[in-house]
Amino acid sequence: MTGGVVAAVDLGATSGRVMLGYVDDGMLRLEAVSRFPNGPVPGPDGLHWDFTALYRHIIEGLRDAIAREPGLASAGIDSWAVDYGLVEAGEVRGEPFHYRDERTVRGVEQVHAVVPFDELYRRNGLQFLPFNTLYQYVTERGLADADVALLIPDLVAYLLTGARVAERTNASTTGLIDVRTGQWDLELAERLGIPASVLPRLVDPGEHLGALRGAARERVGAAVEVVAVGSHDTASAVAAVPLSSPDAAYISCGTWGLVGVELDAPVVSDAAREANFTNEGGVDGRVRFLHNVTGLWLLSESVRAWEAEDGSPIDLPGLLDAAASVDGEVALFDANDPRLSAPGDMPARIAAVLDEAGAAVPASRAAFARTIVESIAQAFATAVATAGRLTDREVDVIHIVGGGALNRLLCQATADRSGLPVLAGPVEATALGNVLVQVRAHGWFGPDASLETLREAVAGAFPPERYEPRA
């Protein structure tokens, strides 16, 4: 084994970061270089990402990484899924739309008028989410005029290196990848009026994309190599889950909770479709069979509303401690209620959902936070049980990674409501998965290191915390 240092550019829906990943004789270590905000920005034609600012933060983060580690071997980029930018004449055309923009509703109607959802599911294996990329593409004006459409991490890689590619794990979320072959479904694209010319060459995690060039190289200060990783952040996160059992379930918990199991082949049964489970690409050709559950978005949006009301920051750890001490029956609501998907006054909307169901609206913020956390945990437990049923597995443990692993109340509530032990951590699973794929591409764990070997290194470096279910 050898070692070195790589950079992980990890972009989430609410924040981004650049991390350094160190490998020394098989031991892993992460170090934060920079963190920066991210989020939706209203525009005259809808909700967008401030991609210009995001890219500037990435460049600054990489520059700081090089200043700290001049021998940086490479960088990898992961982000949330489904959103994209258009490149025309070598330039990014406008700011990418945000997946919560209302235009996706029109896209759903247009797509399903041509291809019924049951056929679509058999072809792409994806759960119904109204913002999947193909729904966005059919509403995109001037799509045919673009040279190429690039998902967010691929767009960043293009600006850094000039490579016009689609990394396969993220491309699997577009709805335009054949779930059985892993290739673009060109027949489906043609039926939907999506030009094949905008679909770039597919690449797998571990492929070298090239070195920084031009303005990017000047601003960063070095010709850093860019390596394709599991560029869908959940693909990177799952690659770093230290699975302790063949029948383990995982929850990658942040803004969303991605709840599922890892498979060798997709499940596209009618039952899976009706349960709204998805088959997304994973590192090494694994299948991430999972369900999207609204995660800590519900809590963070509620805290944001309370902070606006108070005019001062909320002490979140203190709020969660108070929530854990709430006695008595806890009112629950459907965490996946579509009325809770958009930004806005989340406490008022949750209260309306509870009231409509005849449930008591919590009187205090601590009780309200407890209701939110327990409702998320119940949705997690239900999704885990459904994943086991659909794949004929007896799930025996749940791994929670990502920011949710720090939420002790959520981890314990998930154990209690599922009746299964929960192993929490690592928190920075996405950045770790990003790092691991680069490490293997450099041969630092040996030329033929398996995904299981990489996960063993994670378990050794970041031992998870165990939560036992209580009666």
Image (cartoon, rainbow, N blue to C red):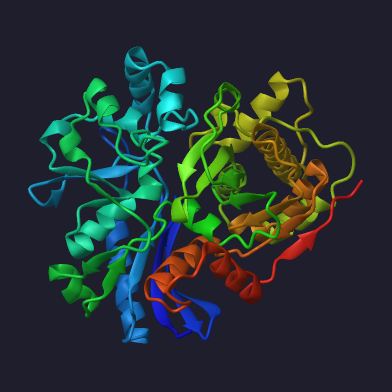
Image quadrant in which you'd find residue 375: top right
Q: Residue at x 67, y 30 (%)?
A: 334
Q: Residue at x 37, y 39 (%)?
A: 181
* Vertical relation: 59 (above or below) 285: below
Residue 462 is situated, as x and y percent measured from the top left of the image, at 64, 72
Compared to residue 218, the image places residue 365 above or below, namely: above
Is residue 35 something that shows in the picture?
no
Q: Quadrant of residue 368?
A: top right
What residue is drawn where x is 56% and y is 33%? Answer: 277
Q: Is residue 111 left or right of residue 22?
A: left
For the residue pair 122 and 163, the one nearer the viewer reads as 122
Tell me: 31 left or right of 405: left
Location of residue 198 with respect to 158 vertically, above or below:
above
Measured from the top left, where is residue 47 in percent x and y?
34, 37
The x, y position of residue 166, in whole percent, is: 29, 49
Residue 270 in which image quadrant = top right
Could one spot residue 54 in this view of the protein?
yes
Single out the residue that lies furthest toward the top: 113
Of 436 and 415, which appears nearest the observer?
436
Q: 357 or 244, which lies in front?
A: 244
